[in-house]
Image (spheres, grey):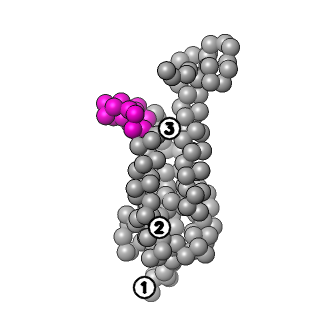
């Protein structure tokens, strides 16, 4: 049996509106998902943002991506991508390569260590996601995705 948000946060009064209840439910759920996801990645010495960068760079292939392209593809916005990439470079997960034809272009690529790490996380991440969403039906997942897409569409651009 599911517990309602009102019960979970021990709120005695009804919410002001359905919109408020939906907003608070979504916020609470995002916070819980983020907390569990962060704990998961800590076991691998990563933050969820660092994993996101590894995933983005793997998808970019051997050419890599510039700092701004990485920033624009991150799931969560981050103001200081340069410092994030500095830390990842120190950990030998990524490498920045200055272009010989355009010195302003400094693509970031995965190192072998970074690729090995992100590849090794495929199954554990799938298991994490299944644990978080696997109890939902395909129809419920499609409805959730569509609903969240509609909400984000009203919020863009930031």
First reached walking from the N terminus: tag 3 or tag 1: 1
Q: Nearer the viewer, mark 2 or mark 1?
A: 2
Relative to residue 70, is residue 125 depicted above or below? above
What main secondary structure does the magenta stretch of the protein show? helix
The residue sitting at 59% across, 39% down in the picture is: 31
Find out whether residue 147 is within the magenta segment: yes
Q: Answer yes or no: do the residues labelled 3 and 1 have beta carbons within 8 Å?
A: no
Q: Examine the rendered structure and indicate whether residue 42 appears above or below residue 134.
A: below
The crowding category of the residue bearing disc 3, from other C-alpha atoms within 10 Å (few below 14, some 14 to 19, many at least 20), is few
- The residue to which callout 1 is attached is 101
Q: Residue at x 40, y 56 (%)?
A: 123
The residue under the point 46% across, 40% down is 132
Left-right relation of 15 to 71: right
How many numbered marks, from 0 up?
3
Which residue in the structure is indicated by mark 3?
Answer: 155
Q: CA distance from mark 2 to mark 1?
A: 31 Å
Nearest to N terminus: mark 2 or mark 1:
1
The residue most toward the left is: 139
Q: Residue furthest top?
A: 13
Q: Secondary structure at mark 1?
A: loop
Q: Is residue 145 magenta-colored?
A: yes
Name the residue: 47% across, 67% down: 117
Image location of residue 44, percent across then percent down: 55, 61
In what element is the residue under mark 2?
helix
Quickly name the residue at label 2: 117
Q: Position of residue 2 (x, y in %)?
A: 51, 22
Quarter of image, res 50: bottom right
Dividing the picture into quadrants, the one containing residue 19 is top right
């Amino acid at each position: 049996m599911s517990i309602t948000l009102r019960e979970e946060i021990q709120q005695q009064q009804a919410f002001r509106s359905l919109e408020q209840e939906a907003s608070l439910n979504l916020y609470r759920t995002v916070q819980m998902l983020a907390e569990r996801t962060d704990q998961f990645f800590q076991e691998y010495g990563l933050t969820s943002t660092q994993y996101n960068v590894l995933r983005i760079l793997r998808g970019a292939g051997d050419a890599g991506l510039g700092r701004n392209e990485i920033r624009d593809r991150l799931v969560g916005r981050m103001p200081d991508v340069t410092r994030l990439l500095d830390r990842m470079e120190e950990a030998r997960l990524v490498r920045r390569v200055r272009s010989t034809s355009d010195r302003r272009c400094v693509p970031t690529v995965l190192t072998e260590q970074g690729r090995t790490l992100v590849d090794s996380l495929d199954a554990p991440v799938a298991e994490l996601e299944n644990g978080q969403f696997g109890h939902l039906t395909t129809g419920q997942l499609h409805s959730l995705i569509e609903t969240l897409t509609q909400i984000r569409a009203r919020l863009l651009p930031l």
